[in-house]
């Protein structure tokens, strides 16, 4: 797929499998009560969000399923993403876990399912399970999260179909340029998780200056930087005004501004190092003793 194809529409991006995915989605990590899920999804939907990102690990698929059913949001108007947890990796486990996710989300299909983290054990079997789920029509698109270049290269050696999305931690302090380039060259859409660095980048003096110049918030500046770089985003907020502003990105940044943000990289993560999760098979920190 040509780069152009990925950006021809402002609000959606065409995936390598032909499906369309909204450029801006709503992250639901830590949205952990029914009340909060109801209010945030209502605001998000009314404001224009159509992609809702959950995961088995967030333990909120049932909350999201209840909210979507209660608010009678037509299924074909929204895009639901979930992710197979480390504990559910392996062929049979992954299939059974997605059957559970479908029940919790009260839907007959998911728009996108990802392997949440690469792990050494079950690396290929889990992917084969996703390929099977797609063939069975339970999942429209299949992708990965937290895959480094090496994991994608390894997957390529046995995959029948490559992931169409790679969801990775990405923000101005972890700009991930080489991986984003690799994704583009391989027809994989990059989706940034923690696109605001969980808030850590919002106090940066240079970003504040640039945002003031455009009369936008630092969050909007950072989110627009992502989308200009061809990266799709799933910001999370439980605050109505922030949910609204995070999808109002109709302003342009100059090439110089984009470059200035690109070079702020410090390789600073808020989450785990994927290579460590790959080795340990889980996200726990290494014990010091
Ligand atoms: N694949 C993975 O391994 C993985 C890992 C982590 C996250 N994710 C996904 O990515 C989504 C987003 O990442 P995230 O939740 O870690 O971090 P994030 O979206 O970068 O940041 C969320 C934080 O920023 C604040 N915030 C949001 N909008 C703001 C604004 N306009 N102005 C000021 N502050 C703002 C939020 O505060 P309030 O909520 O208090 O407003 C919250 O504290 C998650 O919800 C989840 O769906 C995926």
Image (spheres, rainbow, N blue to C red):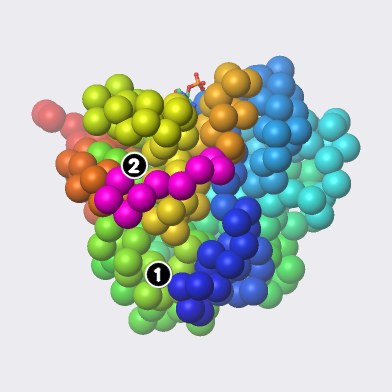
Q: Is mark 2 within 8 Å of ligand 1?
A: yes
Tell me the residue at 27%/50% (across/down): 256
Residue where numbered disc 1 is placed = 184
Q: Is residue 164 above or below residue 114?
A: below
In the rendered structure, find residue 171 and report the number of the disc placed on it.
Answer: 2
User: Which quarter of the figure has residue 153?
Assistant: bottom left
Q: Which residues are magenta?
A: 249-257
Asked whether, in this view, residue 79 is left or right of residue 183, the answer is right
Q: Is residue 255 magenta?
A: yes
Residue 194 lies, in percent from the top left, at 41, 38
- Could you tell me what secondary structure mostly forms the magenta stretch? loop
Q: Residues within 10 Å of mark 2 (few under 14, many from 20)?
A: many
- The residue drawn where x is 40% and y is 69% is 184
Q: Residue at x 63, y 21 (%)?
A: 240
Q: Name the image quarter holding residue 149.
A: bottom left
Which residue occupies the foreground of this view, 106 or 206?
206
- Give x and y (percent) for residue 75: 82, 50
């Amino acid at each position: 797929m040509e780069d152009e194809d990925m950006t021809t529409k402002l609000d959606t991006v065409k995936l390598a499998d032909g499906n369309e995915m909204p450029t801006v989605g709503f992250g639901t990590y830590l949205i952990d009560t029914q009340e909060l899920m109801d209010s945030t999804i209502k605001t998000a939907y009314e404001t224009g969000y159509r992609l809702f990102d959950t995961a088995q690990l967030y333990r909120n698929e049932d909350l999201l399923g209840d909210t979507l059913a209660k608010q009678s949001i037509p299924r074909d108007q929204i895009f639901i993403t979930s992710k197979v947890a480390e504990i559910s990796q392996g062929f049979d486990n992954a299939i059974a876990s997605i059957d559970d996710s479908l029940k919790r989300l009260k839907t007959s299909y998911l728009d996108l399912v990802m392997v949440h983290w690469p792990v050494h054990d079950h690396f290929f079997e889990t992917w084969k399970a996703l390929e099977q789920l797609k063939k069975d029509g339970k999942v429209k698109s299949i992708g990965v999260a937290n895959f480094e270049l090496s994991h994608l290269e390894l997957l390529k050696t046995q995959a029948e179909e490559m992931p169409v999305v790679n969801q990775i931690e990405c923000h101005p302090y972890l700009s991930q340029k080489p991986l984003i380039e690799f994704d583009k060259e391989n027809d994989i859409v990059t989706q940034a998780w923690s696109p605001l660095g969980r808030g850590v980048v919002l106090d940066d003096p240079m970003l504040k200056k640039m945002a003031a110049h455009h009369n936008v918030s630092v969050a909007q500046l950072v989110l627009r930087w992502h989308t200009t770089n061809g990266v799709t985003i799933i910001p999370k907020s439980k605050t109505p005004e922030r949910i609204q502003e995070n999808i109002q990105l109709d302003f342009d940044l100059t090439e110089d501004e984009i470059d200035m943000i690109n070079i702020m990289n410090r390789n600073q993560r808020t989450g785990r190092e994927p290579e460590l999760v790959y080795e340990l098979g889980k996200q726990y920190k290494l014990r010091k003793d």
